[in-house]
Amino acid sequence: MDQSPFTTPRGSISSSVGDPLELEINLTLSEKLKVFKSSTFDPNAYVASKSRSMNEKEIRHLCAYLVDLKKASAEEMRKSVLANYSAFIRTSKEISDLEGELLSMRNLLSTQAALVHGVADGCQLSSLMTGNEDSDMDNILNEKTDISKTEKWLIGYLETLEVLLAEKRVDEAMAALDEGEKMAQEISEGRTTLSPSLFKALQDAITEHRQKLAGQLAETLSQASTRSAEIRSTALALKILGDGPRAHTLLLNSHKEKLQRGMQSIHSTSYGGVGAYTSALSQLVFSTISQAASDSLTVFAEEEPAYTSELVSWAVTQSEHFALLLKKRILASTAAAGGLRIASECVHVCLNHCHLLEASGMTLSPVLLKHFKPFVEQALNTNLKRIEQSSAALAAADDWLLAFAPTSRSSGLPPTSSYSNLSSFQPKLSSSAHKFNSMVQELFEDVGPLESLQLDGLALEGLLQVFGFYVNLLIDALPASIVTENLEGSGHKIVKIAETEEQQIALLANAILLADELLPRAVVKLSHSNRGDESQRRGSDKQRPPEQRELKKRLQREVDRLRDSFCRQHALELIFTEEGDALLNALMYLSMDDGKVEQPEWFPSPIFQELFGKLTRVAYIATDVFVGRDRFATVLLMRLAETVVLWLSEDQAFWEEIETGPTPLGPLGLQQLYLDMQFVMIFSSQGRYLSRHLHQAIKNIIGRAIDAVAATGLDPNSVLPEDEWFVEVSEIAIKMLTGKAAFDNVEGDDNSPTALG
């Protein structure tokens, strides 16, 4: 059957495109895509050639085939990329590098070409301006009709610019450069015409003269005779020319050179003292830094962040140079000699000037503190050591007698209006204590606030150290005892011994008055001016700052150490003989029931009579010495009584004899021990120094003695009198020992406690 000329024979698409199924089976994907990879492939021509002889169905068939081919191609590309990813990345990097190198080469070639053109045009302009033989400038000048208006302007402009630079007329030169820039802008925009070679010559001339002007400005900034106002204007002009970083550096260098010249002038000038020299030098340094900062902010206000770092670094460098200079000339030698006042004054002057800069946001005090702090610390330690050495020397000759000291600036005492109230403010101390207080007060009188140097903590520790050292001297001044003899060779100083009880209590008076009243006043001077009112200084502990309260507690612990040594010393004198034999022992009670004594005369044991007498004398002396400090006197008596009684309560050898010894404690020994303890309790109660610890210790001793007797099978209650008997005997003993009663008829009185069996 003949086919119509307008119909496509079946299978004709297979000849050109092929059956998709047949192609998919017989051809690879690469072969299928081969026709599309040709560099001459034209999509429009390809579609037109295929669709010309195809019906609608075959076109749809072709579209579906192409879509499938597209998907297969994309999938193949994805697989290829994944399979060759590392090679793909490496190739991409190499391509990128090649592109960069090509761009660099192009820029280089462009630069070289511009350079060649510039040289050529420059030669042409030079020949035009200098009137060489081959130049036709003379012809141009003679034939004015051949010279354009712009060319005439150019010739006059270049001559004017040369003159302005030669005469250093900065403002006019900058205006001329601006004029040239505007003309170049008009030429580049086409509003004014000028040959390319002359236009290039104009641009080169502007650049060259701009550089010359910048050089002149830089030279002006470097001159020593340039004044401050001229420095600012010159730096501003240089910044306008586009050389801001150079302008800022030269501005700072100019101030640095002025600073160095000022220092040389101060070094060559004779000043009245170290303080005046330091003040002049410090004022010069920090006023220069302040002026430099002001100039920098004025000229470079818009670009402040860009130049702040350089300004701060420059200021830090100048501050460090100043600190090193002051350290070399003053602080090193002063600190080594212990000149704390001089070193402190120098540092305070510098810090005061430095703090004036903080208003502008420039903090340089940490730079100074880093260099100054070690020397002030050294001077402080040297003075503290000197106080220790002087105190040791004075303690070796102190007679330990209390007396008033003349009122002085360094006494640490408030001014007095009359002699009548002098004693209420000025304590009585021994000579070494007066001198110790004077040295401490002088140490902190004129050093000024040490908080700014962060040395107030060190000063407080130093104060505690020297006070502890002085307390050790006071402890060494107590008479030799078993305890102090055991400490020989352990750092003891040679001091004069306080032989009498009055002298020994004077040791305590020295410590308590220094710790409670005088040294805290020195502490106030560490952080505040000594012009504070007296109410603040004498305020209660709750009103004191925490560090002062803590200091007072630590000072009090040193006083407690001396008090405990005093009590231990006197307790050992009561308990032991000079040969070391114990006077307070179990035999004094056990021997009462050996049958050799028919009937004892009931009276407190001699050792407790001695204890009562010692406490009475101490109380009398303390009342006179510790005026207005009754609590300290009471605590002293408490501790002394406790020391003796607690020793008895804790003496293992004593209780081994009482409880397990071959001779048991009998009823007479129990009664005597009971009487001794009641005697201590009664006179302590009457003297108002019966503490809870003392009362409990007495009860423990009595209870333990009663238990020891009960262990022998004897009923203690059957052999002990009533409590009223012990009270009456104790009160009679107190009156007899104090001489306050007559006992002419005591022995004949049947109702007397001494008559009871």
Image: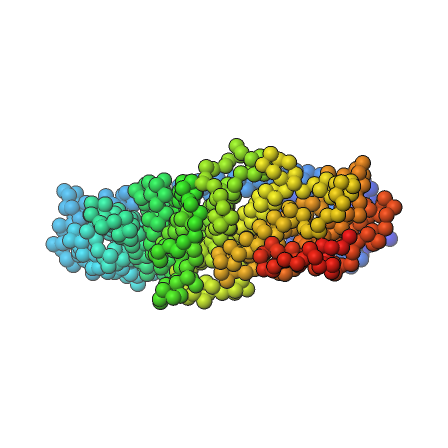
- Percent across and percent down for residue 243 are 32, 52
Asked if 548 appears above or below 134 in the picture, the reply is below
**569 or 665, nearer to the observer:** 665
- Percent across and percent down for residue 714 are 86, 48
Which colour assignment does the render follow?
A: rainbow
- Percent across and percent down for residue 528 are 42, 60
Left or right, 109 with respect to 88, comes to: left
Q: Is residue 73 visible?
A: no
Left or right, 416 with respect to 744, comes to: left
Q: Is residue 22 visible?
A: yes
Asked if 648 appears above or below 519 in the picture, the reply is above
**244 or 431, nearer to the observer:** 431
Residue shown at 71% from the left, 44% from the top: 650
| Residue 582 found in image quarter | top right
| Residue 268 found in image quarter | top left
Left or right, 368 with respect to 278, comes to: right
Left or right, 175 with respect to 336, comes to: left
Count of all numbered marks drawn on residues in the image: 0
- Percent across and percent down for residue 314 are 36, 49
In the image as oriented, which residue stretches furthest toward the top? 489
Residue shown at 67% from the left, 47% from the top: 605
Residue shown at 62% from the left, 39% from the top: 576
Residue shown at 57% from the left, 50% from the top: 614
